[in-house]
Amino acid sequence: MSTTPALSRILAPFAKRYIAGTDKQDAINAARSLNSSGINAAIDNLGENVTTPEEAAASAGEYLGLLDLIASTGVRANVSLKLTHMGLDISEKLAFENAGAVVKKAHAHKNRIRFDMEGSRYTQKTIDIFFKLHKTFPNAGIAIQSALLRSAEDVKRLIAEGASVRLVKGAYKEPPEVAFQDKKDVDANFEKLMRELLLKGNMPAIATHDERLINVAKEFAETSGIGKGRFEFEFLLGIKRDLQKRLASEGWNVRVYCPYGSDWLPYTLRRLRERKENVWFVLRNLLD
Ligand SMILES: Cc1cc2nc3c(=O)[nH]c(=O)nc-3n(C[C@H](O)[C@H](O)[C@H](O)COP(=O)(O)OP(=O)(O)OC[C@H]3O[C@@H](n4cnc5c(N)ncnc54)[C@H](O)[C@@H]3O)c2cc1C
């Protein structure tokens, strides 16, 4: 996928905060630095919506090399991927085969893979492919968005199957037919699903920078006798670094999502949209 050069130039200073670098060694370095603060990493090769089988095969190949590198360097990192990076826009069969090869390799290395969740037109396909692979490879986990109306049902089914869920609010603009439109409802659904996952889930990841929800999770775990080893908090690289370190020093499991690669524009635009102060940052840089 090509990026718009002018937009990329404008956003490059902003993107730096959120991206580990352009190649897998940069991500390994970021993981090693996080590890030294007691924090684990989830490495993601940036890219989505590939349009040719060759690009999809190259993405899968990049992940295979990444898994070997994680194993040979011994960094504490698992891996996240998007099914449209594996060819989902071309065919479900292709995405299944490419993702399957990556999940199999991770399994051989005793490592874990998490499927990111993309826009709602991919939700059902992502869940279908996930369940097909999870039967053979329980090292695969999935992200679920509290913004979606369907997520309570999906979480119930994933808990029943013993699948590891990363709970997120959702980074995509979705229509009212499928998603809550009011942030209060997205947050309330997050809290509800989070309690359910903490009580009954298999190593869930509470992936938010929302300090109120993080405090609710800590308090709920403590009062419900849910041990610190039974779930993890997840953050995105570059956001709330002090809080990441504080939680780790308190003995909670913390993992930071470390994206790398040259196709960074869509990821960066999602980070920009999440917070209006980010738009000011970009504008200030333009005027300086
Ligand atoms: C580990 C991880 C994996 C994720 N995977 C997915 C996925 O697979 N699919 C998906 O749709 N979404 C994913 N997301 C993104 C998620 O859906 C949200 O868009 C994002 O986390 C912002 O929501 P929030 O939970 O932090 O809450 P918010 O209420 O949006 O933010 C809470 C606070 O966090 C800080 N903050 C939030 N975003 C930013 C930012 N961009 N820059 C600086 N500060 C910020 C601000 O202080 C804000 O007040 C993931 C998030 C994490 C942490």
Image (cartoon, helix red, strand yellow):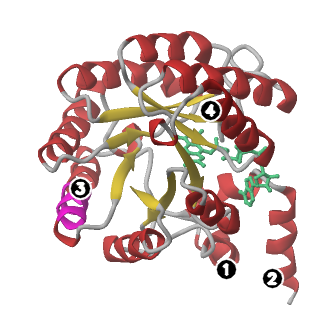
Label at residue 221? 4
Label at residue 285? 2
Q: CB under 8 Å between callouts 4 and 1? A: no
* In front: label 1 or label 3: 1
Q: CB under 8 Å between callouts 1 and 2? A: yes
Mark 4 / mark 3, whichever is N-terminal: 3
Q: Quadrant of residue 214?
A: top right
Q: Which is nearer the eye, 16 or 235?
A: 235
Q: Which residue is mark 1?
A: 13
* In front: label 4 or label 3: 4
Q: Amino acid at mark 1?
A: Pro
Q: Number of labelled discs?
A: 4
* Magenta highlight range: 62-71
Marks 1 and 2, Cα distance to the nearest angstrom? 8 Å
Q: Which is nearer the eye, 1 or 42?
A: 42
Q: Is residue 187 above or below residue 276?
A: above
Mark 1 / mark 3, whichever is N-terminal: 1
Q: Is residue 6 visible?
A: no
Q: Residues within 10 Å of mark 2 (few under 14, many from 20)?
A: few
Marks 2 and 3, Cα distance to the nearest angstrom? 35 Å
Mark 4 / mark 1, whichever is N-terminal: 1
Label at residue 58? 3
Q: Is residue 126 left or right of 218 when viewed as pictured?
A: left
Q: Quadrant of residue 288?
A: bottom right
**Type of secondary structure dominating the magenta stretch:** helix
Q: CB under 8 Å between callouts 2 and 3? A: no
Q: Residue pushed farthest left?
A: 108
**Residue 256 on image: x %, y %:** 51, 58
The structure residue drawn at horizontal position 50% and vertical position 50%, both measured from the top left corner, is 253
